[in-house]
Image: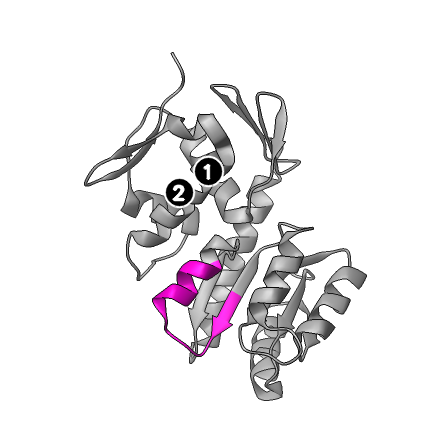
Amino acid sequence: MSGLKILVVDDESRMRKLVRDFLAKSGYDVLEAGDGEEALDIFFAQKDIALVVLDVMMPKRDGWQVCREIREYSKVPIIMLTARSDEQDELQGFQLGVDEYITKPFSPKILVARIEAILRRTSQAAGGESLSCGGIQLDKTAHQVMIDGQSVELSYKEFELLAYFMENKGIALSREKILNNVWNYDYFGDARTIDTHVKKLRSKMGEKGELIKTIWGMGYKLEEEK
């Protein structure tokens, strides 16, 4: 993982330095931006950024605007930082394709651990494996999903969620199991995180979204068409 580029975006220089120092100790190459416009300039100038740590409240362009623009062109993992513990903010972040959401103040060590977990899964997704189910083709190497021959654009977390369902098709999966395997860390939240992602995933899958069945009181199951 060492040597990967991480873009840290925050208008507080003290916060950027704190995060940069911890990431640098872990061997990452850290780029910094102090506002939304600078963040976008750096992101589109650099073609190999592996992950973005993005503050919500910033001058010129806020984190939501930056996230929307990045998501129009890239599935790069995004971790959102915020000083607010507002549930609606968190749900909005996930709906925009944010992969992780961390409320300030936070432990820099935990942030690094979550970054490493996401990057491990990104690396695994590039392992050359292809999955197929009911007219759905998922290519981990290309990070691409095709449904009945048509490309479907998914966020990083939606892609990981669909891959996990396809790897376990026909198996009822509890929300806890999904969190442990897709989020890859001990998640201290509620089931709405998964439900929000599943709802968005189903919508993007069109009619094939009906293959993801809700197991009431438990979780979800992907069933192949008969």
- Which residue sits furthest left? 217
Quick check: marks 1 and 2 in contact, CB under 8 Å? yes
Residue 32 % position (x, y): 69, 75
Are there few (<14), some (14-19), or many (20+) residues within 10 Å of tag 1? few
- Which residue sits furthest top? 226
Residue 213 % position (x, y): 32, 30
Q: Secondary structure at mark 1?
A: helix
In the image: residue 38, left or right of residue 13: right
User: Residue at the spot x=65%, y=61% of the render?
Assistant: 2
Disc 2 marks which amino acid?
Lys
Label for residue 199? 2
Q: Which residue is mark 1?
A: 203
Label for residue 2? none
Is residue 28 visible in this depiction of the protein?
no
Closer-to-camera residue (69/118): 69
Q: Which residues are magenta?
A: 80-93
Closer-to-camera residue (115/192): 192
- In which quadrant is the C terminus drawn? top left
Q: Quadrant of residue 45?
A: bottom right
Residue 77 % position (x, y): 58, 55
User: Residue at the spot x=28%, y=34% of the render?
Assistant: 214
Q: Is residue 89 magenta?
A: yes
Residue 56 % position (x, y): 53, 73
